[in-house]
Image (tube, rainbow, N blue to C red):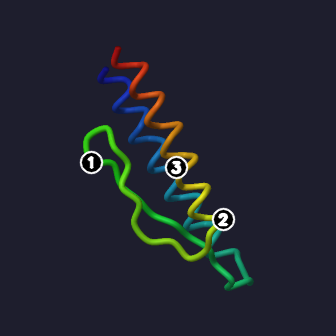
Amino acid sequence: MENLLKLGLLLMVIGFILIFASALNSKNLNLKAAGGIFIGPFPVFGAFTDKNSYYLLIAIAVIIFLISFFLNR
């Protein structure tokens, strides 16, 4: 379980670095974003800038929920 925690934190750091590097190299300022959090096993959707980002956020949240549900059985 400790290895999964380390892997998750590593993936988060890599994701932040990639997003930051992408923002520095981007000349197009038409940014799209969505954000949400998990409270326990349930996803709560926060802010989004367009419907496509929202649908992508929902899909990712459902996948994460299903993975966590089946891993904890």
Furthest-top residue in this view:
73
Residue placed most toward the observer, 30 or 46 = 46
- Residue 8 position, x and y percent, is 41, 37
Residue at (40%, 28%) from the top-left corner? Answer: 68
Q: Is residue 17 left or right of residue 40?
A: right
Q: Residues within 10 Å of mark 1 (few under 14, many from 20)?
A: few
Q: Residues within 10 Å of mark 3 (few under 14, many from 20)?
A: few
Q: CA distance from mark 3 to mark 2?
A: 24 Å
Question: Does residue 23 lie above or below 52 as drawn?
Answer: below
Judged from the image, the secondary structure of the residue bearing numbered disc 3 is helix
Q: CA distance from mark 1 to mark 3?
A: 23 Å
* Mark 3 vs 2, N-terminal side: 3
Residue placed most toward the observer, 29 or 65 = 65
In the rendered image, which residue does mark 1 sit on?
A: 39
In the rendered image, which residue does mark 2 sit on?
A: 52
Question: Does residue 45 lie above or below 69 as drawn?
Answer: below
- Residue 20 position, x and y percent, is 55, 67
Q: Residue 37 occupies which quadrant of the picture?
A: bottom left
Question: Does residue 27 lie above or below 42 as drawn?
Answer: below
| Residue 14: mark | 3
Q: CA distance from mark 1 to mark 2?
A: 23 Å
- Residue 38 position, x and y percent, is 33, 48
* Mark 1 vs 3, N-terminal side: 3
* Mark 1 vs 2, N-terminal side: 1
Q: Amino acid at mark 1?
A: Ile
Q: Amino acid at mark 3?
A: Ile
Q: Residues within 10 Å of mark 2 (few under 14, many from 20)?
A: few
Residue at (36%, 55%) from the top-left corner? Answer: 44
Q: Is residue 18 left or right of residue 66?
A: right
Judged from the image, the secondary structure of the residue bearing numbered disc 1 is strand
Judged from the image, the secondary structure of the residue bearing numbered disc 2 is helix
Which mark's residue is nearer the viewer, 1 or 3? 1
